[in-house]
């Protein structure tokens, strides 16, 4: 969409996702906005309670929502305004009228009939949940399949295809054929309007109160950082592995811009190395690095734990108990599972949550991510270790406000993976490992 100036008023015809997004965008920009839809409610196909709530909230924010009506005619008044007349008898003036009422699949000229690809009555390409047509060698994603005609959905379909066909990991587009609501709520739409300057606005930034922002889905980059972090820590992306952007883009179904931003964040977190002319790679592992890392983390974690024991109140104590319970529920013997890893991270964060220093906790979290890779390596060497018992002892000492004992137990707990790896002959450097 290209406009030479911001209109004072707009009428948007349609009740689907795109129509609702643009109505919210223009309303957020201060435009007198009317949304007209022929159906009984907007967002057909979504949960009925969600549809009703969205329509109500849009009305509260100033969008005029007309349901059960559609355009009968549009004429131009003498003053230049457009006059829209609707089937329910209403009439409204506006500077701009926008139609967001969908489109038919455009498959003409592809020769699909020549190879026997089956089409739906409206011309859409018929596919199964894996985007396969009835011809085994032909797949289709995006609007030509007339499933959910949204850009992020098409991207997800393409990523699912890559997982299925190239990585031998059969992946359906979405369970049940529809993406989860939260993934769609986080979609970002950008609109450019030329009036004295270019203005880019994100739908998710318009007119949100604090409660709404708490519920908002994470951005693509933030979600990607989380996935990359897990894969690095779990070893799916091996230490020292070169990270080729095109391969990663296909693997995670994201663009190069989001991928570069995510990798740069992981460089700052100490999990990825950026090298001039060579790009990105997973940070290597070595004995010297691990020993230095462990002692640094012992110092930082102990400092944060002492501060939390001194400052923490009832909420801090409750947080430790809750995280301790969650860790126990994750189960002994499941230390390599993602669920346990998440619970383990939450437990250690609960211990230091009352430290009162954002920077200290950020440094501690980065060190925890780096040490997690080494800790997982140590789990390959079985021994008489009671990890849950170690956590329980640290928690009991912290809750008893015994800072000295709590820090001693924590230090021993953090150093134990290093002792296990050293006993197993962990190499001094990457060069030694290759010899």
Image (spheres, rainbow, N blue to C red):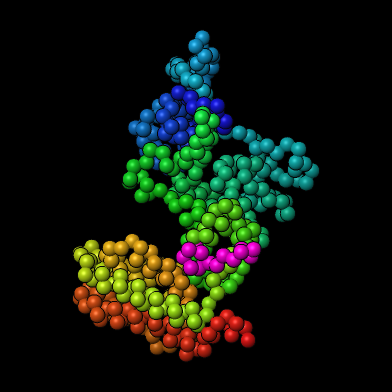
Q: Which residues are magenta?
A: 266-279
As drawn, which residue projects farthest toward the right? 114
Residue occupying image coordinates x 77% and y 41%: 111
Quick check: 5 above or below 162?
above
As drawn, which residue projects farthest toward the top? 78
Left or right of 138, for residue 183: left
Residue occupying image coordinates x 54% and y 17%: 74
Seen from the viewer's position, the closer of residues 326 and 278 is 278
Magenta region includes residue 209: no
As drawn, which residue projects farthest toward the front? 276
Left or right of 202, for residue 275: right
Q: Residue 273, position in %: x, y?
A: 55, 67
Q: Residue 433, position in %: x, y?
A: 59, 84
Is any atom of residue 328 visible in this view? no
Magenta region includes residue 272: yes
Residue occupying image coordinates x 76% and y 46%: 116
Q: Which of the 4 image quarters holds residue 348?
A: bottom left
Identify the image quadrant of the N terminus: top right
Seen from the viewer's position, the closer of residues 130 and 365 is 365
């Amino acid at each position: 969409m290209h406009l030479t100036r911001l209109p004072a008023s707009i009428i948007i015809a349609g009740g689907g996702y795109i129509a609702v997004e643009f109505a919210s965008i223009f309303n957020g920009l201060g435009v007198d906005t009317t949304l007209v839809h022929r159906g009984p409610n907007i967002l057909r196909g979504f949960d009925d309670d969600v549809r009703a709530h969205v329509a109500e909230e849009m009305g509260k924010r100033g969008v005029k929502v007309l349901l059960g009506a559609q355009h009968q005619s549009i004429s131009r008044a003498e003053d230049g305004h457009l006059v829209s007349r609707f089937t329910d008898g209403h009439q409204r003036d506006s500077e701009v009228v926008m139609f967001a009422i969908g489109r038919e699949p455009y498959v003409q000229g592809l020769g699909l009939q020549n190879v026997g690809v089956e089409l739906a009555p409206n011309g859409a390409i018929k596919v199964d949940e894996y985007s396969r047509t009835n011809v085994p060698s032909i797949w289709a994603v995006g609007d030509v399949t007339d499933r959910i005609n949204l850009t992020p959905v098409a991207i997800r379909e393409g990523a699912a295809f890559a997982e299925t066909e190239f990585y031998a990991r059969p992946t359906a587009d979405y369970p049940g054929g529809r993406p989860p609501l939260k993934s769609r709520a986080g979609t970002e739409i950008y609109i450019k309007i030329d009036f004295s300057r270019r203005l880019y606005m994100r739908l998710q930034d318009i007119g949100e109160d604090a409660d709404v922002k708490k519920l908002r889905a994470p951005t693509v980059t933030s979600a990607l950082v989380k996935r990359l972090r897990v894969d690095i820590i779990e070893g799916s992306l091996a230490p020292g592995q070169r990270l080729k952007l095109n391969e990663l883009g296909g693997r995670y179904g994201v663009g190069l811009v989001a991928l570069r931003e995510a990798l740069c964040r992981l460089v700052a977190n100490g999990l990825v190395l950026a090298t001039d002319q060579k790009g990105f790679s997973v940070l290597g592992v070595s004995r010297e690095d691990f020993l230095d890392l462990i002692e640094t983390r012992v110092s930082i974690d102990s400092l944060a734990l002492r501060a939390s024991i001194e400052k923490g109140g009832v909420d801090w104590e409750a947080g430790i108990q809750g995280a301790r319970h969650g860790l126990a529920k994750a189960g002994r013997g499941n230390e390599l599972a993602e669920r346990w890893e998440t619970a383990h991270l939450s437990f250690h964060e609960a211990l230091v949550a009352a430290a009162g220093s954002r920077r200290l906790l950020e440094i501690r979290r980065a060190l925890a991510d780096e040490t997690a890779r080494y800790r997982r390596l140590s789990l390959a060497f079985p021994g008489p270790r009671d990890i849950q018992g170690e956590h329980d002892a640290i928690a009991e000492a912290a809750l008893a406000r015994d800072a000295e004992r709590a820090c001693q137990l924590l230090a021993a707990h953090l150093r134990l993976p290093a002792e296990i790896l050293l006993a197993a002959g962990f190499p001094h450097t990457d060069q030694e490992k290759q010899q």
